[in-house]
Image: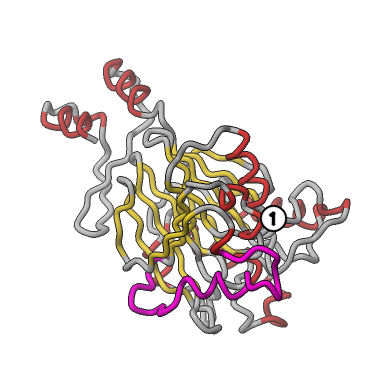
Amino acid sequence: MILIYLFRSSKIDCLLDGLKSDYGNRTFYTLLPSFSNCHLCYFLYILLNIHPLKVKFYGARGSLPVCRREFERYGGNTTCIRLLREQANRVAIFDAGTGIRKLGKELMNEGLDQKLVNIAFSHFHWDHIQGFPFFAPAYKVGQRIGILAPGRKGKITDLKGIFSIPLQQEYFPVPLERMGASFEFYAYGEEETIYGAYLKSISQHHIYPGGSYGFRVHDEGKSLVICTDIEHIDGIDQKIVEFARNADLLIHDGQFTTEEYTKFKGWGHSSWEQAVEVAVQANVKKLIITHHDPDHNDDFLDSLEIQCQKLFPNSLFAKEELEVVV
């Protein structure tokens, strides 16, 4: 960012576009990919983008995990997303569904040396926390694990209890206090800066106690929005549209088809068509549909992805192991 402002003051305006995002009185610039007449700007673009922001899916299934051959390509693990901030050399995690087990093993095999690993939770339904007891770094003595509830400052009185109760010995052999790592519990406000990344949270329509929260991350000149377990109950929620405005990547719940949604209205999820509508109205650059219904097999999801891409060409349905650069 220092380099950007230095060259801005030198009037190399072709390096920057004029789009701004007003989040917490901050200004974010997006680098333009067109440098036909400016070799210096092309060099700076390469220089400033050698540390990309990467998103990887370790679980994209909703409600409960599934394990059958016809679900292999999209995967059966429940929600877990890894965010790799290469410039900061930090990993952050969103939700701890069953997919976090594999992520934890990978981190340990790679020789995890990040002293504090943060896990941000959209909400605390089983499919978003059930992998937590099997997260290998949680058993590493000396490791610090941050349990984050962004947007819920003053709304949660016992965040630790949400995790310690399911780990009572009636339900699991290892209680939280004996896992090995030290756990730190934070109910953040709606806007926070965490290790240099700006995080904004929004309450989503989810009728169950505690609701659910969407996240917007700004880092390394890019913006990522994650909205899972969200329901657009009476038309598209315009608060969510504004929240996702001009994002580089929107990850959105799409558990149902429109036909299915009429049967499951009030369950706290969206149709993939609603996700597309949010992406169109918000003018996002890329859309990924996630939180797939446990009854939707690979072939069915393939057919939905084809329909989705006809409406919003730069879109995908999330698969386990899918990694994208924001």
Residue 247 included in the magenta stretch of the image: no
Kindly tell me whether residue 43 is visible in this rendering.
yes
- Quadrant hosting residue 146: bottom left
Q: Which residue is drawn at 43% across and 67% down?
A: 149
| Spot occupied by residue 43 in the image (x, y as percentages of width and height) | 32, 18
Instruction: Determine if the magenta segment contains residue 152.
Output: yes
Q: What residue type is labelled 1?
A: Gln
Q: Residues within 10 Å of mark 1 (few under 14, many from 20)?
A: some
Any part of residue 310 in sight: no
Q: Quadrant of the N terminus?
A: top left
In the picture, measured across the screen, residue 184 lies left or right of residue 293, that is: left
Magenta stretch, main secondary structure class:
loop
Q: Is residue 297 left or right of residue 143?
A: right
Q: How many marks?
A: 1
Q: Is mark 1 on a helix, strand or loop?
A: helix
Q: Residue at x 35, y 56 (%)?
A: 199
- Which residue, given by chain and number where applicable, does mark 1 sit on? 307
Q: Where is residue 147 drawn, in percent x and y?
A: 46, 61
235 vs 34: above or below: below
| Name of the residue lying farthest toward the top | 39
**Segment tinted magenta in the rendering:** 150-176
Q: Position of residue 132 (x, y in %)?
A: 61, 59
Residue at left 33%, top 78%?
A: 154
Depicted 290 relative to depicted 19: above or below: below
Seen at 86% across and 53% down, the residue is 70
Image coordinates for residue 250, horizontal then vertical, percent? 49, 54
- Between 45 and 84, the residue placed more toward the observer is 84
